[in-house]
Image (spheres, rainbow, N blue to C red):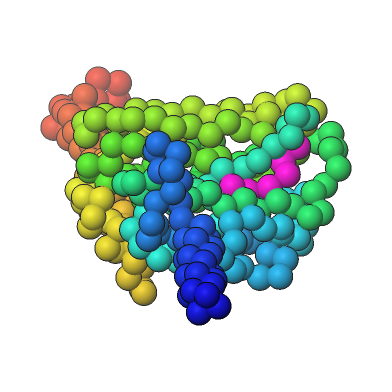
Amino acid sequence: MKRGISLFAAAALSFGILISGFSVFAAESSTGGPVLNAPYLESISFTNADIDGGFSEGKTKFTVTLKDPSVSPMLDSYKVNGTARLFVNYIFDESKRQTGVEVTLEFESGSVRYTFDYSNAKEYEVTGNANLSDLICDYGEVVPAVNAEDTDYKLYIPSDLSRLKLTPVTQNVNASCSPLDISLNETQEPKLNFTVLASNGSTKHYTFQILRVDKTLDEVREEMNSSDYVSFVTDEKFYEKPEFLIAVGSAAAAAIVLYLLAVIIRRAALSPYDREEKNFYAREEK
């Protein structure tokens, strides 16, 4: 009898360990049930934020301490075990105060959600700062990099990317800007508009023109995973390249200069006076 109890206890313990391990790395499927062997984050880091106690693979809820409580943290680096797309969003309270970061891994059979709540969230402060500091887009590249002066940008994406999930990052934690999740066909290149609302009620408008490069999602993903990756925007249409624009401008300037020279020479050649004709007003010498 004791042997039977021992075997039952051992089986129960093993089952408990299995369930425990399963719950740590399980994800939620589209039907609400768990997914076995789901992709998960192996590591992640943010600018302007330290994860309290460090990142652990067995957790999905964390707190982070902001180095500057008035500045929004941004995704710095991450590593995923498995194949999944990573999306970043920001968490706000009822007063539109930024209180944390939400990171979601999405894959074919479900998703895993991680939350990073600010341990030192800044108290609501009225400011006029309505600047964006970044636009997070999985497999997208913003040109030029988001800055405080420009409001018009290009957003390059793979040729076959059909879903865009965009997260605008406000420079100030008390400003807000709604994320965007849209579906596109492979020919669409729309212009997207974002409006940042500062805590004092002022706004700033941004536009991002979508442009597709001659690379597929798989090709872009492979480039991004390389150790020396810098940018995948190298094969954009020739008439959109800076070198082409400079060449066109130089050619146009040269054409203008040649035209002006031609006009000057022509005027000099077509003198209204005949050099061999006597001057009408000249006094005849005696």
Residue 1: image x %, image y %?
52, 75
Residue 256 in picture, x, y percent from top left: 27, 38
Quadrant (top left, top right, bottom left, bottom right) of the C terminus: top left
**Front position in the image: 232 or 97:** 97
Q: Is residue 96 left or right of residue 178?
A: right
The structure residue drawn at horizontal position 59% and vertical position 47%, both measured from the top left corner, is: 102
Q: Which residues are magenta?
A: 97-102
Camera-side residue: 68 or 274? 68
Seen as rendered, the residue at the extreme left is 276
Q: Measuring 59% from the left and 61% from the top, which residue is drawn there?
A: 59
Residue in view at x 40 percent, y 36 percent: 31
In this rendering, the answer to whether 273 lies above or below 234 is above
x and y percentages locating residue 115 in the rendered image: 62, 51
Q: Quadrant of residue 230?
A: bottom left
Q: Position of residue 42 (x, y in %)?
A: 49, 68
Q: Residue at the bottom extreme? A: 3
235 w.r.t. 174: above or below: below
Q: Is residue 169 magenta?
A: no
Answer whether residue 158 is visible to the viewer in this image: yes
Q: Residue furthest front?
A: 1
Numbered-mark total: 0
